[in-house]
Image (cartoon, helix red, strand yellow):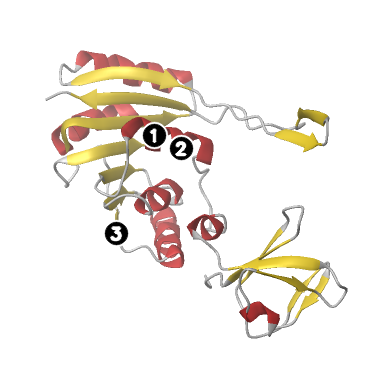
Amino acid sequence: MNKIKKILMTRDGQQFFVKDIYHDYHTQFGAVKKNDLAKNGKIISTNTNKELCIFTPCFKDCYKKIRRSAQIIPLKDIGSIITETGINSKTRIVDAGAGSGALACLLANMAREVTTYEIRDDFAAIVEENITFLGLKNITLKKKSIYDSIDEKNIDVITLDVPEPWLAIGPAEKALKAGGFLVSYSPTIPQVMDFVVKIKENCNFIYIKTVEILEREWDIDGRKVRPKSQSIGHSGFLTYCRKIN
C-alpha cells in the first residue's frame, strides 16, 4: 500500500487521500495541479475554481484507509477500551485475535508496545500490510492461538476479540500483572454470559462491568437540528475485568 501524502478537504468535510504528489490529482470537482500538492495548511483551487483545504495527514487519516477483511472494532468501542484501562505511552498490551489489525494498530499508536495474536494466515498477511502502511515499529504479530498460551509476561492490558474468550482466561491470568486489565469484545450475549461465568469462578480476577456503546450523530443546520437517519447502533459488548494478584 502506498503512503498517503496529502489530504484534500472540501468545506463540507468531503476528503480525498492523495498518494502521488508528483502528478496532477483529479476529483469530481476538477484537477489539482501538482505544484499545489506541495503546499500545506493552505486553501487551493481546482481548475474549476472549487476551493479545497490541503494538509499533511495525521495517524487517524491514514488509519481510515487501512485494508480490512474481518469486521473491525468501531472507534466508539476502542475509545471505551482506552479510557477504561488508562492506556498510555507506558502500557504494554497483548491483543487477540488480530483480524485486520485495526485495534492493535490504533493502540500501538498510543502504547509502549503491542503484541497481537492471529491464527489465520490470510488475516495475518493483512495485519502485516497494515502495520507497514501505518509505519508502526512497536507492534509484533504472532501466528499463534492465545487459547494455548501467552508468551509475554507482566502485561498491563489484554484485549480479546475471539469466538470463545473464556478459553483465554487461563493464559491471560499468567500474563497479566497484578492490577492489569482483561477486556473481552463479543458480538453476542451468550458469549458474554459464558465469559463472565468463568471470570467469576476465577479468584484472581474481579469482574467490573459489561457495556454496550451506542453512538448517534446529529445534523446541525442553523436552528434545524435532528438526529441523522442512520446511527451506529449495536456493534458488540465490552466486558471489563481486572487481575487482583
Q: Are marks 2 and 1 in contact (CB under 8 Å)?
A: yes
- In which quarter of the view is residue 140 placed? bottom left
Name the residue furthest right: 48
Residue at left offset 48%, top offset 34%: 77
Q: Which residue is mark 2?
A: 79
- Mark sitting earlier along the chain (1/3): 1
Kind of residue sitting beneath label 3: Asn
Q: Which residue is mark 1?
A: 83
Residue shown at the point (53%, 51%) measured from the top left: 69
For label 3, the crowd category at 10 Å Cα-Cα, with few meaning under 14, some 14 to 19 and many 20 or more, is some
| Marked residue nearer the N-terminal end (2 or 3) | 2
Callout 1 touching callout 3 (CB < 8 Å) = no
How far apart are the two marked residues, 2 and 3, measured between alpha carbons?
A: 20 Å
Secondary structure of the residue carrying numbered label 3: loop
Q: Can residue 7 be seen at all in this image of the molecule? A: no
Q: Quadrant of the C terminus?
A: top left
Pointer 2: residues within 10 angstroms few (<14), some, or many (20+)? Answer: few
In the rendered image of this protein, does residue 150 appear above or below residue 38? above
Asked where in the image residue 41 lies, by quadrant, the reply is bottom right
Instruction: Say what amino acid the circle numbered 1 marks.
Output: Thr
Q: Which mark is residue 138?
A: 3
Q: Nearer the viewer, mark 1 or mark 3?
A: 1
Q: Secondary structure at mark 1?
A: helix
